[in-house]
Every structure is written in C-alpha cells, then in structure tokens.
C-alpha cells in the first residue's frame, strides 16, 4: 500500500487507457504555452490565463501519475523570458513562487518529488526559497518526479556544464580524455533525469524554445493545437496513445530486406 493518495479521478469519469508498460514514456517534457492567448481570447488579463495554467499543470501531472509516468518536467520560466515586460516578469516571479506554496500540500499528498532546474543568478530570492522548500519537503516522495524548470535554458544548462567541466579539468579532477556523453550528463542541472521520451507543447507553436535540448536528442515531438489552460489528463492520455504507436529507431534503422527470390 502506498502511503500517498492517488489524484482524484477526472470529473468526466474518464479512465486511464490500458497501455503496455514499455509504451509509457519515462520522461515527459511540457512546454505550457498559450496561457496569454487563452486569456486574450476571453478579454481577460494574461495573468488569468496563467492562473488557469496552474490548474492545467496539476491536471496533467494527475494524468501522468495515473499512467505511471515517472518523470515530468515543466517549463515555467526560461532564461530568455526576462525579455518580457517588467510587469509580466514580476507577475511570473510571484506567480511561480505562489504555485510552489499553493501546491505543496498536493505535492505531498500525491507523492510528488519536486526538483528545480535552472540558473540561480537573477532568479528572485523568494522564488528560490519556495522552490527549495518544495524540494526539501518532498525529497522522500517517490510516485513521480516533477522538475520545475525556472530560469532554465537548454543552452545555459550545457554552457554551465562546460564551465564546470573546464574548472574540474583545470583543478586536476577531470581528464579531458574522460569527457564522454555520460560525463557531460553528470554535469547537467539534474543529472538523474532520463532522456525525454515525449516532448509536448501546447498552443500550436512548433518549436523547442530552448527546452531540454540535451535530453531531447531522440524525443518524440508532439505539438498540440490547444491552448495550455484547455489541457487536461484526457488530452495527455490521447497523446501517450499516439506516442505508443510511434516507431522509435534511435538512428538504427534497418532496411526491410526484400524476400529472397528463387531462380
Ligand atoms: C516557452 O515559450 C514557454 C515557456 C517558457 C513556458 C512559459 C509558461 C508560463 C509562463 C506559465 C507557467 C505556468 C505555471 C503553471 C508555472 P517562450 O514564450 O519562452 O518561447 P517562444 O518565444 O519561442 O514562444
């Protein structure tokens, strides 16, 4: 018996699809795009869209738990998002911190282990505190790992790993000849994160926007034509069913040999 409560079922009564264990992605990457557009379409301030986005995130995490996905990474604020208006940056800083506090009881109840990936400099101290509190208070949870990517950038993560490796080489702790792909992985923000299997972006935009670049080398990409606040677990389940039918080759394609013909 798990010491954690399962998420409440979806109000529609929809049930999780039966899929083989090996058809379930191990790592789901989420680009939660479209909150602003969702609000604009309704004549609401962008901030209202972000609030609905929080509900959608928890709903998708519930669906991931139902499916048995062990790792979900959510892109909450990129290293490039500082270019947004000062008012929106301030809102997003406060909002992200508040999400972490507001959802902490649910993280604990559902057994979610929270991790933070991203750069420390420039990130508001109040946000770092609440991310670190959530990390500390959920560290023994083992139902799912939710990595909140805040002040995160894929290039920044790789560049920071390069700096750390260069420092270790300079100080004699690392031999240049031992820098393999596995070694680079060890210097990333969250070295234990497996490769992304399913990369899901809402709102119809078809780009990575600097998310999980290293980890997504062989990710299956899915771009959904719905805005993030309209996401729910049923959409995730359909996406995973689609994923389960994809033919992943990792570069190892084999020609289909024509059957030998007899003379
Ligand atoms: C990347 O697109 C998208 C993000 C970094 C996600 C932003 C998400 C939020 C602000 C909502 C956070 C929600 C919760 C619940 C914490 P981009 O706009 O940075 O990149 P682009 O300009 O290439 O589209």
Image: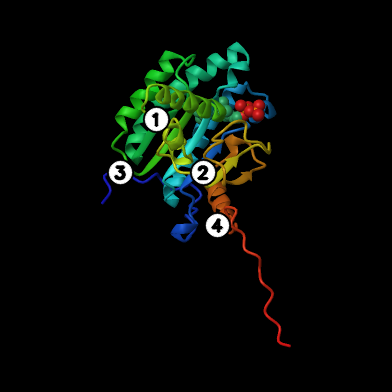
Residue 224 position in % (x across, y down): 64, 43
> Is any atom of residue 130 visible in this view?
yes
Residue 183 position in % (x across, y down): 43, 37
Disc 4 vs disc 1: which is toward the camera?
Answer: 1
Disc 2 designates what residue? 196
Disc 1 designates what residue? 174
Q: Is residue 168 above or below residue 12?
A: above
Please report whichever mark, 2 or 4, sits nearer to the chain's N-terminal start.
2
Res. 193 image quadrant? top left
Q: Is ligand 1 less than 8 Å from the beta carbon at label 1?
A: no
Residue at 66% across, 71% down: 257
Disc 1 vs disc 3: which is toward the camera?
Answer: 1
Q: Is residue 196 above or below residue 15?
A: above
Q: CA distance from mark 2 to mark 4?
A: 14 Å
Residue at the limit of the structure toward the bottom, as seen here: 263
Disc 2 vs disc 3: which is toward the camera?
Answer: 2
Disc 3 designates what residue? 4
Q: Dividing the image into 4 quarters, which one contains the C terminus?
A: bottom right
Circle 3 — which element? loop
Please report whichever mark, 1 or 3, sits nearer to the chain's N-terminal start.
3
Task: Say if mark 4 contacts mark 3, CB within 8 Å.
Answer: no
Q: Residues within 10 Å of mark 2 (few under 14, many from 20)?
A: many
Disc 4 vs disc 3: which is toward the camera?
Answer: 4
Q: CA distance from mark 1 to mark 2?
A: 27 Å
Circle 1 — which element? loop
| Res 32 label | none
């Amino acid at each position: 018996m798990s010491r954690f409560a399962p998420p409440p079922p979806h109000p529609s009564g929809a049930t999780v699809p039966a899929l083989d264990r090996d058809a379930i992605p191990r790592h789901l990457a989420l680009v939660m795009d479209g909150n602003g557009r969702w609000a604009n379409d309704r004549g609401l301030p962008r901030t209202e869209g972000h609030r609905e986005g929080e509900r959608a995130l928890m709903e998708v995490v519930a669906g991931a738990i139902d499916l048995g996905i062990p790792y979900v990474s959510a892109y909450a604020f990129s290293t490039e998002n500082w270019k947004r208006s000062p008012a929106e940056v301030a809102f997003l800083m406060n909002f992200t911190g508040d999400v972490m506090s507001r959802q902490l009881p649910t993280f604990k109840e559902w057994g979610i282990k929270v991790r933070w990936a991203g750069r420390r400099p420039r990130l508001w101290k109040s946000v770092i505190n609440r991310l670190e509190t959530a990390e500390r208070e959920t560290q023994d949870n083992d139902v799912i790992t939710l990595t909140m990517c805040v002040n995160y950038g894929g290039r920044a993560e790789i560049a920071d790993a390069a700096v750390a490796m260069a420092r270790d080489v300079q100080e004699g702790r690392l031999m240049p000849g031992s820098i393999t792909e596995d070694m680079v992985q060890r210097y990333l923000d969250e070295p234990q994160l497996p490769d992304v299997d399913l990369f899901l972006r809402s709102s119809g935009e078809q780009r990575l926007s600097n998310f999980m670049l290293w980890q997504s080398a062989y990710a299956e990409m899915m771009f959904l034509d719905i805005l993030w606040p309209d996401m729910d677990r049923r959409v995730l389940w359909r996406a995973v069913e689609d994923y389960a039918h994809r033919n992943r080759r990792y570069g190892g394609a084999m020609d289909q040999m024509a059957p030998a013909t007899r003379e």
